[in-house]
Image (cartoon, rainbow, N blue to C red):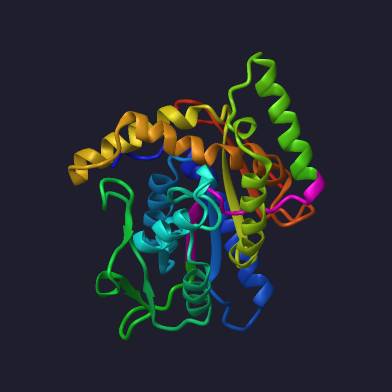
Amino acid sequence: MPDEPKDKLDICISFALEQLDAHREWHGKTEPTPFFLGINGVQGIGKTSLVSSIARTLVQAPHTIPTVVLSIDDFYLTHDEQSQLAANHPSNPLIQHRGQPSTHDLSLATSVLSSLKAGLETSIPTYDKSAFNGQGDRVPPSRWTRVNITQQPLIKLVILEGWCLGFRALDDSQLEACWEQAVHACESGIGYRGRLGHNRLEDVQFLNEALKAYDVVTDQLDALIHLDAEDTQYVYEWRLEQEAALRREKGSGMTVAEIVNFVNGYYPSYELFTERLRAGAFGGCRGNQLRLIIRKDRGVKEAVQL
């Protein structure tokens, strides 16, 4: 795995340590609960490699912080459950495969995060994206990683990464206004590159309603790093690169056409929910959200702390 560009990693480490110090200070003399750090970013932007670099740095001296890394992807529905969800809503193209709000097992996510916060022995689920020719499936529990077990230090830092982490649902009028604007842009035929305008209102309303339940995950976070693509269209090229690497590693994966279709299913949510995330996932200026504007080469163009 290539090293992260120094600017990106150094910025994130500095932010994480600042937030951890504030967390310890707030708890005073009592033993602080584990700190929950979220990482948001579009597909292929480099969330996984950045998270690995952050964790690798913080578990080593001089920091020596017991850390566990999770992905929102690891809480996807099983293949059978996802197939059933798609069959129950055959006219909604946005949920015919994993990815969008409604395709995660939030009960499992809540259970795992609550267990980690309480310092209990916890099994961390894993999802195999290469299973079923790239459709994916959850790995059997017997192969999940266990943390907080006997003779292991208790986890003090939980890093959770995910493409929709920190997204908040829009109210009905905001949603409809965003959709109508996208439809008009799409119908004009002048420079529209999004996907929201190609979808029915009732289909995106389904996603927005499902997203409300995801607050139980976002509300667990103590801080958030938002990797914000300078141009969201970069996601197509980044995702193609990601799938090529997965195919080399696993020997199977999606075709180019399948990848484009797959990203198309995510894109309406980028159009709907990114602006609100840029304004802050936690409400107000609390200093616990870091927005990194990312260039096409995945380097940092600008850093903004909210």
- Classify residue 238 by image quadrant: top left
| Residue 45 seen anywhere in this rendered image of the structure | no
- Nearer the observer, 56 or 185: 185
- Classify residue 23 by image quadrant: bottom right
Q: From the top left corner, tell me how far across and down residue 304 is, in percent.
A: 67, 40
Q: Residue at x 65, y 77 (%)?
A: 27
As drawn, 42 above or below 280: above
- Nearer the observer, 176 or 295: 176
- Nearer the observer, 201 or 56: 201
Q: Residue at x 36, y 62 (%)?
A: 80
Q: From the top left corner, tell me how far across and down residue 51 is, in percent.
A: 43, 51
Q: From the top left corner, tell me how far across and down residue 251 is, in percent.
A: 17, 42
Q: Residue at x 53, y 27 (%)?
A: 233
- Nearer the observer, 111 or 137: 137
Image quadrant where one finds the N terminus: top left
Q: Is residue 142 left or right of residue 135?
A: left
Q: Is residue 167 magenta?
A: yes
Q: Is residue 163 magenta?
A: yes
Please state the extent of the stretch shown in magenta in the rendering: 158-173
| Residue 228 seen anywhere in this rendered image of the structure | yes
Q: From the top left corner, tell me how far across and down residue 45 is, in percent.
A: 46, 37
Q: Is residue 11 left or right of residue 241?
A: right
